[in-house]
Amino acid sequence: MRNKLSLLLFLICALFSLACNYIVLPECWEEASKPKGSGWSAVATEVGEVEGALRIALTLRNDTGDWSAMQAEAGKPATLSAGGKTINCETVQVSSGGHRLAPGFQMRGFIGGTKAEPKVQLVYVECKGATPTPGAQLAINYVYFTGQYNYYEPEANKATGVLKVNLDEIATGLTYPVGTTLPDIIKKPDVEITALNKVTLTLTNIERTEKGLRFAWKTSNPGEYPTYVHIGNPPVIGADGIIYGLYETPDLASVPITPAGGVAEWTTETTVPADVRGHYILLSVESGKQRLYANYAIDISEY
């Protein structure tokens, strides 16, 4: 469908170009084709030898200018260049864990594994047989997706890039999760969000539990028909730069139906270590149409 739209816009523009010296691209064409930022960036936070390999710990930052998920390109090793030589690095644990991260936010890990056995997955690359060398540079091919998540078109707004990391520059003193602040990205906990069919969503309570954080949600439906509003089980990212909450598409977690003219209430929980603070909820809300999710960063750092 997207390819057909692009072809139609191209033909329209071509016809107009016959009658004038220049053309103005339709706004929808510009939005679809122009990158909103420079992609993702990465810095090395630690470089050391581990069991015969050079391990490079990384921090990733979303510099796309929009909400975005990323991952290293499957089947392509990272490359380490130094002293006129280039070697392949086969162990590439570089990803946002499936989650969309707010623009300007940075991270160094996420929850991977399975529901039965979740584990913290740090972001790093290992290069067997390599040693620290002055002037070394790491290059990682990656793919990323920007904007709202569309269940029916999960790879919409896909782009590619190359992370280039100078290993002579080790980043210290990084502040997580906010790397750069962009206007109107971060919302207060009491924000009222307009969701699907003009239903409003609010976060009514936050509490610490033995395992982590529990959130109470409320939807209010002004319409004449009952509506589901899916938000999944929202993950959080803390001051340690880890995204807590195993990634699932937002439609998988069940939510109560919001009756016409009524309200619905439910809770979600995220497992978080007791000593981690400074959290932000990475909230995806079904908005506009079914299975299309808008994103919000909710500041709950006092918890």
Image (cartoon, grey):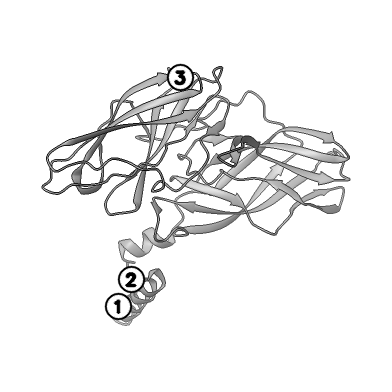
Which residue matches tag 2?
Answer: 23
Label 1, label 2: how far apart the Cα atoms are: 7 Å
Secondary structure beneath label 3: loop
**Residue at the spot 66% in from the left edge and 37% down from the top edge:** 43
Q: Residue 73, image x and y in percent?
A: 64, 56
The quarter of the rendered structure image containing the N terminus is bottom left
Question: Where on the picture, by quarter, is residue 18?
Answer: bottom left
The disc placed on residue 16 is 1
Residue flagged by tag 3: what amino acid is it? Thr
Nearer the observer: mark 3 or 2; the answer is 3
Q: Residue 72, image x and y in percent?
A: 63, 51
Residue flagged by tag 2: what amino acid is it? Ile
Which residue matches tag 3?
Answer: 209
Label 1, label 3: how far apart the Cα atoms are: 62 Å
- Tell me which label, 1 or 3, sits earlier in the chain: 1
Question: Where on the picture, by quarter, is residue 231?
Answer: top left
